[in-house]
Amino acid sequence: MAQRIDPWTSTEIADYKRLMEEFGIESMEKYRKRYAELVYIRRGIIFGHRDFAKISECMEKSKKYAMMTGMMPSGRFHIGHKMVADEIIWFQKKKADIFICAADIESFLMRSTPLEDARRIAVEEYLTNYIALGLDPEKVNFWFQSDYNSDYYKLCDMAAREVTFNELKAIYGELTTGKIISSLKQAGDILHPQLEAYGGTRPVVVPVGTDQDPHIRLTIDIASRLKEFKLIPPAATYHKLMKGLQGGKMSSSRPESIISLSGDPKQESRKVMSAKTGGRTTIEEQRKLGGIPEDCVVYEFYVYHLMPDDSLLESTFKDCRNGRLTCGECKKNCAELLEKFLTEHQKKRLDSRKKAEKLLKRK
Amino acid sequence: MAQRIDPWTSTEIADYKRLMEEFGIESMEKYRKRYAELVYIRRGIIFGHRDFAKISECMEKSKKYAMMTGMMPSGRFHIGHKMVADEIIWFQKKKADIFICAADIESFLMRSTPLEDARRIAVEEYLTNYIALGLDPEKVNFWFQSDYNSDYYKLCDMAAREVTFNELKAIYGELTTGKIISSLKQAGDILHPQLEAYGGTRPVVVPVGTDQDPHIRLTIDIASRLKEFKLIPPAATYHKLMKGLQGGKMSSSRPESIISLSGDPKQESRKVMSAKTGGRTTIEEQRKLGGIPEDCVVYEFYVYHLMPDDSLLESTFKDCRNGRLTCGECKKNCAELLEKFLTEHQKKRLDSRKKAEKLLKRK
């Protein structure tokens, strides 16, 4: 049986190549040079896409397009989320209309998060950090699923006619009432930027991890079937996900697995010292055999966030592989870089919080 | 296996008593005298209820309560719909807050009615006739499912957590995505009058035919489980349904089965002349054996709509049973009464149409 990707249960998906073959995600290879400015594209972290040619064309020819993304406001904003923030900010610089959804209904249905908590978390954790990282709040459409207008809801509801039960089961596995509502809301979230009131028909790109691909596939089907609206099926980019500090999934529900972007810089960066590395059992062995950066959480921090300079990253890689760099030194270096970043970030957060509140009131 | 009642497929349900036993609907018997002013209660057409004691108490003690009803705006408003209109108007006189929903999303999902058509039908057919029949449009909350505010949608969506798949299957039989969305919308329609913005927690009564009981049962469960809101489970009254002109179900999709309240009085009332009666094969036989009013569509017209005077109704019943009244005379009498009513009604519609439009613009 084919592997199922399910946004609500999947943990770690190592074999990206196989995923691409099974689910028809295309390679980003041909865009790596053209959009090398974004570190995640340059380094192959954004490894796949659907229909990105459409989006690339809009960028190159200054045509109208939009980027849509969502957040599940049920935990702390951590270093793993920073990548999505950076992608949003990049698309904003590339002139996309930016749509950000706080999926408080999904969070309520799937995790029983009270709506008020979701609201607080969306502002304090997500929006504030997005803005501190560089998002321009003046040019953002931000909404809570529970607090949007009827055009949007109409679209979510009408989508229900276009998808059969068996299709939903094939995409999501065992169904619950909550899963069905959540998946139709996702489709509405992704498609509604194309309604008249939100800018009209135009390409929309959704940057996601592979676990969100089921929503993308469902939405593509709905867009092509729902003739009552003029909808272009969404495009998507797919990124790999950072591992948690001890390996495995990075998750807000296990604070030891994450670096919080809202927490104390010293305390947070200290966690790096006990991260899982690609090191050997003893220093002697490591000097002899070298480390394994491909299997090292600390090295991932460099790749994703802390070493934008490619030549520095390359020399670090080599130093690890040939045993010159020990894990002790390397973790210390990583913790320092991280603390520096987090300290700067905290300063930016002070002002960002107010801007985030303002963004909510604008609606 | 127990009989299933399903709002989307059930046709005629003859055995009301058995239904009451199987589904726990209580008898209206004890209220027949107290509320004899409403012909449908007096004559046992409204035969059952859930929790009507709560509503009766509100009426007697002048406490706040609400009445909620919906319409499926996909066809012509016919004589069968008049009963619901009369019930709404009666509840309005009994000081209920009136909530009327045009279920355009359900109509789209289950019958593919375009939303614009639903809007036109709701105004031209339903609202205009409601007002012509006596509804005071100044004291009505009227909405389209597709055009309501987020408080309402929030409630519909959050309800999804409170009901399992197997419960939905037990209530509605084979499920479709559209049925699930429609049933949750129904729950939202019935419960939202209790939200702060719509008057707050108070008893709500829903007058329905038995085919709608699945929605009532679902909504009762949701109300008692959804602790995020303070909701009293809805009360309901159950009415029998008039048969179509040729017997069987009265349905807008078969114009020969209905009397339209918006059509030409002469043309519509003429249809009575070919109605299915409880008469015998020949006049001779009828004079000898008498007719069967219990099995006569024409007699139903008298009971439901055309003979509010009980003693006149009784003498007509007797005249039929003892063979004094032939079907020919009786149909002619019925057609005349009907034409008179429809002619009066058409006059009232002229002004009502404008009021209906205004009701929509008020939102």
Image: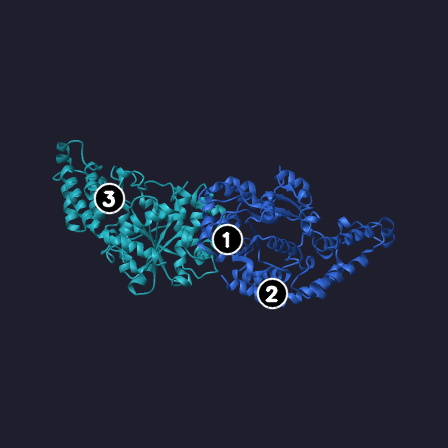
Chain colours: A blue, B cyan
Give, as a three-letter code, the residue at label 1.
Arg
Give, as a three-letter code, the residue at label 2.
Ser
User: Which of pointers 3 and 1 lies earlier in the amino acid sequence?
Assistant: 1
Within 10 Å of the Cα at label 3, are there few (<14), some (14-19), or many (20+) other Cα atoms? some
Mark 3: secondary structure: loop
Which residue: 36% across, 41% down?
B10
* Horizontal and vertical percent position of residue A309: 75, 54
Output the chain of dot 3.
B
Mark 2: secondary structure: helix
Can the viewer see residue B189 in this picture? yes
Is A280 or B62 nearer to us in this picture? A280
The numbered mark at residue A352 is 2
* Foreground: disc 2 or disc 3: 2
* Foreground: disc 3 or disc 1: 3
* Foreground: disc 2 or disc 1: 2
Determine the CA span between mark 3 and mark 1. 45 Å
Output the chain of dot 1.
B
Within 10 Å of the Cα at label 1, are there few (<14), some (14-19), or many (20+) other Cα atoms? many
Output the chain of dot 2.
A
Determine the CA span between mark 2 and mark 1. 34 Å
The numbered mark at residue B161 is 1
Which residue carries the number 3 mark? B263
* Horizontal and vertical percent position of residue A84: 63, 54
Is residue A42 shown left or right of residue A144?
A: right
Circle 3/circle 1 CB separation < 8 Å: no
Is residue B144 shown left or right of residue A125?
A: left
* Horizontal and vertical percent position of residue A303: 73, 53
